Image (cartoon, rainbow, N blue to C red):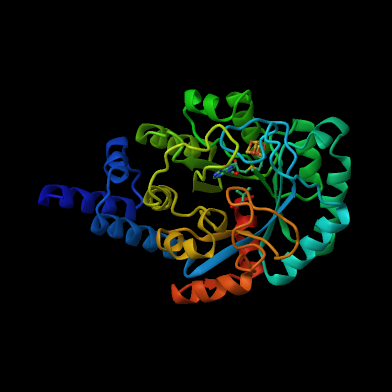
């Protein structure tokens, strides 16, 4: 970078630090960075903003992928319907409850109840799941996120009344053209609309991106604008991990720095929001980099030997216990961070509701 460009980057970061909204051309400058010393400056500014809103406190989410059956054909996903090369599971109510209790006991702040768009629920109804969610809520009082795909307004309402706090459905991209190549046969509009419907019902909303799936810098800027319009409470980006026996199994990969830079840019644009560092992408080894980039929630905590899978990495770090609170604590400590208590997380959610 020449002197002028360095001065320009410093100016952009100063503006972000003062929380003056960045313009498109400024976001473009950030997204084009690839030199280590420039990235280090962006990460530092991101951490500075995180500290302003969250001090050194980090939140943590338990992940319960209770059914890997799915009626959809997402080109990037291992669990797409036509992939017959994997054994699927659907956990019983008792198993889900046991997992929920053990995660809460271990100290997570929220349970993320996730499934593929399991045809069983979509044809026979969500009543059993709604009853179970109600029971988990009453027993543990934990915050709950539902990641079950695109639900009808009626079902969303029932889950909200049963005590679900968050609704998560990631658009992956806000380029409609690219979306159509990724979420094959699924309506862009409908998926987007349900997030607004859910928000109006009082859910907190998580929006998410996949990077390394053919997304351009312009697409990413559009995504940031859509996230702003949606007023998403939690925003994420994950690197695409190629999956065997899927249409994108040989898709060329992009360097991890792209995800890290995006985490940092998200923090600059949305300083007071929650931004995950997912253990699902690079396991425990990838946690420090994501925290350094400005993330403030560790997601995809999974109890070992529970027979539960991840998504982008279906088994990495699970059975050896690396996706647990006790293993993340030393990593937080090494980075000058601590785990928040449940009360602090509840307070944050309450303020946004
Ligand atoms: N079935 C629900 C849905 O699609 O909204 C919820 C679970 S889905 C498996 C959760 C997210 O996992 C997807 O939205 C996508 O962002 C992510 N994911 C799926 N396959 C992935 C892959 N190969 N690499 C990285 N992330 C992936
Ligand atoms: C995670 N593997 O948090 C989970 C998943 C779905 N709401 C979340 C992608 O990384
Ligand atoms: Fe199904 Fe979700 Fe995977 Fe798409 S991303 S195939 S909806 S589990």
Query: Which residue sits at x=88%, y=57%?
Result: 94
Q: Relative to 168, is 3 on the left or the right?
A: left
Q: Position of residue 160 (x, y in %)?
A: 76, 44
Q: Position of residue 353 (x, y in %)?
A: 64, 50
Q: Relative to 156, is 228 on the left or the right?
A: left
Query: Which residue sits at x=66%, y=68%?
Result: 343
Looking at the picture, does residue 140 appear above or below residue 91? below
In-front residue for pair 324/58: 324
In-front residue for pair 95/227: 95
Query: Which residue sits at x=53%, y=38%?
Result: 249
Q: Position of residue 199 (x, y in %)?
A: 64, 39
Which image quarter: residue 339? bottom right
Q: Position of residue 321 (x, y in %)?
A: 64, 69
In-front residue for pair 258/11: 258
State which image quarter holds ligand 1.
Answer: top right
Looking at the picture, does residue 85 appear above or below residue 133? above
Q: How many marks?
A: 0
Q: Relative to 110, is 120 on the left or the right?
A: right
Q: Relative to 138, is 301 on the left or the right?
A: left
Q: Residue furthest left?
A: 3
């Amino acid at each position: 970078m020449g002197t002028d460009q360095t001065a320009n980057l410093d100016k952009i970061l100063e503006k972000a630090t003062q929380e003056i909204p960045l313009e498109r051309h400024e976001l473009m400058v950030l997204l084009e960075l690839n030199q280590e010393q420039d990235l280090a400056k962006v990460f530092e500014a991101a951490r500075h903003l995180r500290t302003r809103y969250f001090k050194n406190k980090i939140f943590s989410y338990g992940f319960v992928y209770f059914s890997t059956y799915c009626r959809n054909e997402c080109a990037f996903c291992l669990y797409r319907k036509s992939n017959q090369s994997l054994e699927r599971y659907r956990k019983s109510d008792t198993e889900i409850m046991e997992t929920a209790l053990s995660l809460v006991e271990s100290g997570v702040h929220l349970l993320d109840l996730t499934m593929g768009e399991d045809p069983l629920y979509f044809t026979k109804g969500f009543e059993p799941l709604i009853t179970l969610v109600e029971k988990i809520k009453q027993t543990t009082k934990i915050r709950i996120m539902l990641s079950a795909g695109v639900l009808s307004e009626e079902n969303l309402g029932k889950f909200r009344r049963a005590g679900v706090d968050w609704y998560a459905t990631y658009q992956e991209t806000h380029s409609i053209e690219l979306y159509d190549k990724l979420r094959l046969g699924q309506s862009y509009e409908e998926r987007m609309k349900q997030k607004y419907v859910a928000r109006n019902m009082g859910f907190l909303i998580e929006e998410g991106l996949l990077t390394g799936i053919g997304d351009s810098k312009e697409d990413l800027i559009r995504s940031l604008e859509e996230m702003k319009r949606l007023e998403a409470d939690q925003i994420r980006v994950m690197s695409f991990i190629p999956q065997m026996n899927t249409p994108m199994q040989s898709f060329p990969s992009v360097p991890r720095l792209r995800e890290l830079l995006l985490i940092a840019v998200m923090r600059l644009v949305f300083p007071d929001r929650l931004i995950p560092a997912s253990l699902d992408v690079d396991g425990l080894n990838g946690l420090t980099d994501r925290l350094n980039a400005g993330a403030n929630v560790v997601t995809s905590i999974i109890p070992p030997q529970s027979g539960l899978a991840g998504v982008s990495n279906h088994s990495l770090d699970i059975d050896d216990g690396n996706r647990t609170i006790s293993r993340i604590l030393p990593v937080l400590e090494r980075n000058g961070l601590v785990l928040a208590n449940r009360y602090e997380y509840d307070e944050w959610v309450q303020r946004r509701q």
